[in-house]
Amino acid sequence: MRFGLFGTGPWAHLAHAPALGDHQDVEFVGVWGRDPDKAAALASEYGAKAYGEIEDLIGDVDAVAIALPPDVQAPIALRAARAGRHLLLDKPVAFTAAEADEIAEAVAERDLASVVFFTRRLVPETDDLLAELVALGGWREARVDHLGSIFTTGSPFGESAWRQARGGLWDVGPHALALLLPVLGPVTEVTAMAGPHDMTHALLRHEGGAISTLTLSVDAAEDEVRQEVVFAGEAGLRRFPDAQWRADQALGRGIDQLIAAAGGGPAPAIDVRFGAEVTAVLAACQEAITSGRTVAVGR
C-alpha cells in the first residue's frame, strides 16, 4: 500500500515515519509538512519525496498517515477520504464532533479502511485484557487516572501549542476513553470541571448505567504523575498492568489492521467511527467544563 505522511513533528519522527519505513507491505511515498525544510529532511531520511502541496501527495498514494494537530488533521483527513484514500489518523480525530462525524461519513460512503492511533489499544496485552473484561461483564464502575508532565525539560511534546491550549482532556483523555468504551459501552451524559495546572476531572454515565471517572493532566507535579486503570463490578476489581510498548511497533500493528481491512478484512475496532465517538465525549466534557452543567452526549 502506498502511504503519504502528513506532519514532521515529534510523533512523526518517533512513530509514523519509522513504522511506515519499516513495514514490509508499505511503500513510503512522500512527506508533506507545514515547514518545507522539515518535510525535506524527514523525507530524505526514509528515501521518500517531499511534497509542497497537499493535493499532490494525496493524489500519489492509496492511504495517508497524519501526525498533525487535530484542527490541522481534520480538514486534510476529509480531503483524503473524499479522494478515496484510506486513513491512518492520530487522536483525537478533531476538536469538534461535527468534524469527526463528517470524516467518518466520508469513509463509510466510500467503503474505506481507517485506523485511529490509540496507542495502548495496539498493544496485544491490552486488547486481550479488554476482551476478557467484555466477556465477564457486570462492570458497574471504572476509574482512569492519566497524569503526565510534558512541560518538563526533555519532553518532545512540551512545545506543542495545541497541547498547551487544550491540555490533558484532549491529549490523554482519548486514551482513557479508548479503554472505557469497549467495556462499559457508549457514554450518554457527562459532567466535568477543570482545576489548576490543567487538572481535569470528569464523571461519565454509560448507556448500561455504569459510571466512570477520569482524572487527566499533562501538567502534573512530578509526584502526581501516574497512570492507573481500574474496573469494578460483579467480578471484583481488575487493574490494568503496566504495558511495555514502543510507539512505532504499536503503529505498525495499526498499519497491519488498515491494510487487512482495505483488502476486505474486518473493520478495525479503533476505526474513525470509534474515533468520532471518542471526540463526541471529549467535546461534551469541554462543554460541561465551560457551562458548569451536565451535558448529554449526542451520539
Image (cartoon, helix red, strand yellow):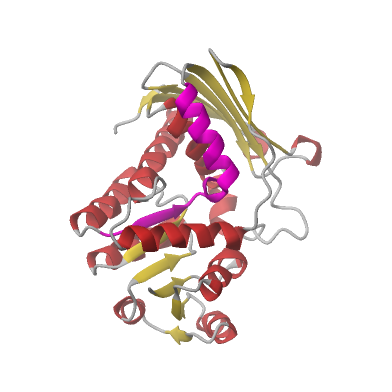
Say whether residue 16 is left or right of residue 184.
right
Image quadrant holding the C terminus, namely top left
Q: Return the x and y of residue 110 as percentages of the image width and height.
A: 20, 60
Region in magenta: 112-136
Q: Main secondary structure of the magenta part?
A: helix
Residue 92 visible in this rendered orientation of the protein: yes
Q: Nearer the viewer, residue 186 or 182?
A: 182
Residue 4 image position (x, y, % from top left): 41, 75
Residue 72 picture quarter: bottom left
Q: Is residue 115 magenta?
A: yes
- Would residue 272 appear left or right of 248 to someone viewing this image? left
Task: State the residue at coordinates (53%, 87%).
Answer: 47
In the depicted structure, whether residue 267 falls above or below residue 283 = below
Q: Give above or below for 144 relative to 107.
A: above
Q: Quadrant of the N terminus?
A: bottom left
Give 59 or 39, whichever is nearer the viewer: 59
Residue 199 falls inside the magenta stretch:
no
